[in-house]
Image (tube, coloured by chain):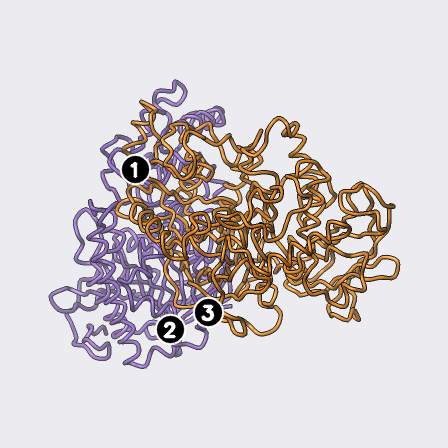
Chain colours: A orange, B purple
Amino acid sequence: MTAPGTPAPAADAAGTPDPSRRTVLRTAAVGAAGAVAVAAGPVGPAEAASGYFRHGVASGDPRPRRVILWTRVTPTRAATPGSGRGPRIQVRWQVATDRAFRRIVAQGTVRTGPARDHTVKLDARGLRPDTAYFYRFSYRGRTSPVGRTRTAPAHGALPKRVRFGVVSCANLEAGYFHAYRHLAKRGDLDAILHLGDYLYENGVGEYAMGQRNVVVRPHRPRHEMVTLRDYRQRHAQYKQDPDLRALHARHPFIVTWDDHELTNDTWAAGAENHNPGEGRFRARRAAAFRAYDEWMPVRMGPRTRVGDGYRLYRRLRYGRLLDIAMLDLRTYRSQQSRLTPTPIPNPDPILSRPDRTITGAAQMRWLKRVLRRSRAQWKIVGNPVMIAPILFPPLPNEITGPVTDLIGLLPADGLPYNADQWDGYTADRSELLRHLADHGITDTVFVTGDIHSAWVSDLPVDAGTYPLRSRSVATEMVCTSVTSNNLKDILGAPPRSASLVVEAAIQTLNRHVRYLDFDSHGYGVLDITPQRTQMDYFVTGARQQRRAGSRWSTSWQTLAGTQRVRAASGPVPTRRGDR
Amino acid sequence: MCTPYGGDGSAADPRSLAEVDLDRRHVLRLGAAGGAGIVLSTALDSPVLAAKGRKRAYVIVLDGMIPGEIDSGLMPRLKALRDAGTAFPNARSLPIMETIPNHVMMMTGVRPRRNGVPANAIYDRRAKIHRDLDRPSDLRFPTVIERLRKQGFSTGTVLSKEYLYGIFGTRANHRWEPFPIIPISGHAPDLFTMQALHSMVAQHDPNLVFVNLGDCDRWGHTDITGTTLRALRTAALIQLDLQIGQFVAMLKRTGRWRNSLIVFLADHSMDWSRPDRVITLAPRLARDPLLAGRVEVSQNGGADLLYWTGPRARQAEAVRRMRRIARSTPGVLSTHTPKRLRLGARAGDLVVYCKAGWRFSDPAPISNPIPGNHGHPATAPIPFFLSGGHPVVRKRRSPARARTIDVAPTVGEFFGLRPPRGGYDGTSRLR
């Protein structure tokens, strides 16, 4: 099914030079001389009149009576992102119930300056639950583009439906953000769940589109981001992408990070893509966190103030219908096993060592408490990396567990192909899934990013005996990437060819995996009602083309009380008008 | 006069007068139907025998059912009823997740702290014995059954388990004594329970009937294929669905449906344990010098209630030791004070829950050979939905956390009954 009014997407032509790419490169070259590389899209009248607000507006982390509002001001020509230049200034903000700002319900001023890269972030309070608002900023008589946001329902409310856009893994060098553009057209979303890899750290050409590594749009700065200046500039570049800017202006974001917000395969004290020549890892991480805090509409500390803490894991509530637990699976995790490279099955016995962690002890305690105490029907876990076991083959834990304890030669659950996921930290996964079983916690759905492919799985306590003996205690729905390379891109194969063999092999061995698509890019729409949670998968077209369509691909749902997934007959109808 | 079930619920033949059992129940056993022996009893002192008005409410407990089983494809009739009614997919049983306390909470609308029934089995400190809470006097709070009676409504109980029949005593105008009872399980099969329900509706047509269907739970307990095939339980689910379908069909045929509210729910769900996952606390506690000979363990499937029987002055220290020993025992999930769980003094000094896939077996490892199990938090999720043709039943799904304790307020509101003194602990689910 093709979404109304959109052309059917064409396949990527990775590796084939094309006019659009050259156009982009020219645009970037112009941008290199001065302002902005990727502000090549259509510019609305408000934006044209708002030179102070070149990075758009955004909102995030909606609560019943407050929401984060964000923008970045460029008060002088010299005050470019990361420059550390420019005056300290005062910016006015307003929230209204109408787009014309006749009914203003909250307003105030906020200070910013070079110390925080002239970003503005505030918690607008005194709002009404489950209500749409418009917001804007003004500086020296010029106003920003108008953003739209929506508060969460009251904690005691019983919403009939909540709907999210779901995205992850948007690499600017690998293509245009069609997923963002198509989601921005929808008015029926409560928020966008961004599950990480919002931006990529790589230098130009290090990790671009397809097997031939085509740079659709070059990163700025051109080198790998390492310093605070680098991170700020890269955030600024992404914020100027017109599709992302449109999506931010249309819906509030609920975000978490994965690794590329810092660097590839990050763990608590290092990363695969960090070497001593790039300085101390902790200094680099502090810079990445600082820039993220400045540039993202997210609450990271006890208050909204930049630098007051970098705790990203947090809970958001949508009445009694659902709680969202957003996880941080990078900051506290043990180092990944590198015995074999992904995707070679990894026989490293340390994978199941109980002292290894992906969440860290404090976050695990918090997550278990949130899940146990939640009175909401659905428990949505914003999960940066896959939790479903993908093993070759899954082994019955009740048999291998004692053997592993004894001889310690193999991972207890089986051999994973990707030890960067929960598969590399099986003690934590087992603890969490057993916690769900022990406490009778139902209707938990992990919504996941990271892996550039779409997966739908049941989550058994013991995959080795599923479904005959072990039962499923939750489900997982993984959205694919916005642009980042997937299997067909890496293989250079046509869509739905070589990947089919791999998909069949994985599903044969891992019976809890019910759906797998290694080939597509796109986004999800997660629709939650008391009856079921459903993810509609939408596939977007050629990444290197500035415009490409979007079509519905498949839908999967978890019926309340079942802890299992099943195919749905079609996508949820798009509602008219704004929520 | 009672008339037995005649198949369509509208006609029946008179049956023999049963014996009068004044000493135990003060009831008049009025009728028997067919070879199955459907015997209904009507309280002699009941001021009202006939229904008042047109409203009918049926609370049907699908004992031990897991919420997802309704969507398993085995229960199309029940699923259709749920989908057409008001469903609460976030519903949960309350501690202790056992049969008697949750049936009592359904009918009282208050927690065990107020109704006096925290578990199936307790240690009776006064009598110094372990026993089931199956006596009418164990229930210390007015039920919606008797409160409706006082307001002139007629009520009935059709309870498949002997201990439920025991504790609810003569509170209803009309009741069925479960028969035939299956040895060991102590319950009457659903086939007979449903026949009794049909008979009761046909003969007395009470305003409220409280029904317990025990097969699903009992076959879940005893099914040795429980962790894999669950063969007996699966058969019970299919049979139960058929029986429910016939009951609804009867209500529709006889015109009762449009005036009826049916509350379908479970008292708890079910978990299955392996033979090697058994927790026996008694010998561990006995190895502690302070606790030896001074702790009683009342086993409730997935929950153990521990009672300190030593001097009061050493109670705090004893509870600390009990908690430490319990928490260090493999398979134990958590420990709680009865006060925190709002269970009241009868629940002893410490409640110990097991993990999913485990069970308690006290005082000896062979004391509890049953694989199917409940009482612990793993068995808290339950199905809960309102059905029926009365206009109060609307087609909707609510994420609200309905609980067993909500039944009495719901039924009470349906009949316009005022809350009891001190109010309900539960919430009406009509709104």
Describe the element under mark 3 as helix, strand or loop: strand
Q: Inspect this view and state whether residue B11 appears.
A: yes
> Where residue B409 sits in the image (x, y, percent)?
47, 62
Relative side of B167 to A555, left or right: left
For badge 1, the amino acid type reads Leu
For the residues carrying marks 1 and 3, which lies nearer the camera in this image?
Answer: 1
> Where residue A444 sits in the image (x, y, percent)?
45, 51
Q: What residue would you read off at disc 1?
A: A395
Residues packed near mark 2 inside 10 Å, few (<14), some (14 to 19) or many (20 plus): many
Say which label, 2 or 3, has the lower sequence index. Answer: 2
> Where residue A60 sits in the image (x, y, percent)?
66, 54
Q: Residue furthest left?
A: B35
Where A177 sits versus B353, above or below?
below
Q: What residue would you read off at disc 2?
A: B388
Q: What residue would you read off at disc 3?
A: B396
Identified at 38% across, 28% down, the residue is A349
The residue lying toward the viewer, choosing from A273 and A450, is A273
Q: Are marks 1 and 3 on the same chain?
A: no
Work out how far the residue at label 1 is from the one at label 3, CA to CA, in angstroms: 42 Å
